[in-house]
Image: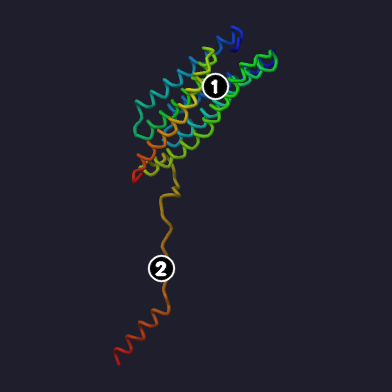
Amino acid sequence: MIDFPEFLFDALLVVLVLLFLTVVMAIIRIVKGPTAPDRVVGLDTINTIIIVSMVVFGVIAKSIIYIDVAIVYAFLSFISTLFIAKYLEGGEF
Amino acid sequence: MITEIIIYIMLAAGVFFNMLAGVGLLRFPDVYTRLHAGTKCTTFGSIFIIGALILLGLKALFLEGNTDSSILVIHSGVALAAILLTNPTGAHALARAAYKSGVKPVGAVVDDLEKKPKKVKTVNVEKEIDKKLSKKEAKK
């Protein structure tokens, strides 16, 4: 695949570490969150950041399959968010 | 050389906005403001980070003639389109669900969705006249 320079490799690793720091912040919100919608908001944020970090990791590991998995993960997390929202809203499906 | 500088700037901007989303999730007082931070900031940051990777693939494709990197460009673009389509829709559904499950905005003075519009009593004039007339006839 792509042979990119060594310093870009290090920069992408730093990007991954900072993204996982953001995931840790969202996990703190999930543990603390006073109501159920708070926790779902944290979960939604974690899903988006996981998609981005999967794409970054696919470039680091030089294999496209991670990016394909990220596409499928995006749509599945969207469907799960919609169903949780429907459940919180109450009423019939 | 200049494309690498642009890639670094875009990566830094994307990471900055994604971390703003995390800080906003921790600091905001309310479900709706947390949703505002956690969804819009991650969408904007994802555009920058995946855009930097697409730019990396385009550079390898056009400047170095590496045809394998076109796969990276197309698949990253599809992943970015998936994020851009699904993220605002999910946020809208979540905000609606949070309002319907009874969470009120903190510090909000006016709540437009709370009160239903007043029902105006409509009077059918002909029926009223008929009623009065029938009462008079019953008296006679």
The residue shown at (47%, 27%) is A72
Badge 2 crowding class, 10 Å Cα cut-off, few under 14, some 14 to 19, many 20 or more, is: few
- Viewer-proximal residue, A42 or B63? B63
The answer to which quarter of the image holds residue A89 is: top left
The answer to which quarter of the image holds residue B16 is: top right
The answer to which quarter of the image holds residue B117 is: bottom left
- Res. B16 mark: 1
Which residue in the rendered view is the most extreme toward the left?
Answer: B139
Element type at mark 1: helix
The correct choice, above or below, for A25 with respect to A87 in the image is above
Q: Is residue B44 left or right of residue B25?
A: right
- Amino acid type of the residue tagged 1 in the rendering: Phe
The residue shown at (52%, 16%) is A58
The correct choice, above or below, for A27 with respect to B128 in the image is above
The residue shown at (41%, 73%) is B123
Badge 1 crowding class, 10 Å Cα cut-off, few under 14, some 14 to 19, many 20 or more, is: some
Which residue in the rendered view is the most extreme toward the top?
Answer: A6
Q: How far across and down, in percent of the image, does residue B139 sit?
A: 29, 90
Identify the subunit bearing mark 2.
Answer: B
- Amino acid type of the residue tagged 2 in the rendering: Lys
Quarter of the picture containing the C terminus of chain B is bottom left
* Snapshot colouring: rainbow
Report which residue position mark 2 lands on.
B121
Disc with the residue nearer the chain's start (1 vs 2): 1
User: Does the rendering let one see residue A1?
Assistant: yes
- Viewer-proximal residue, B60 or B96? B60
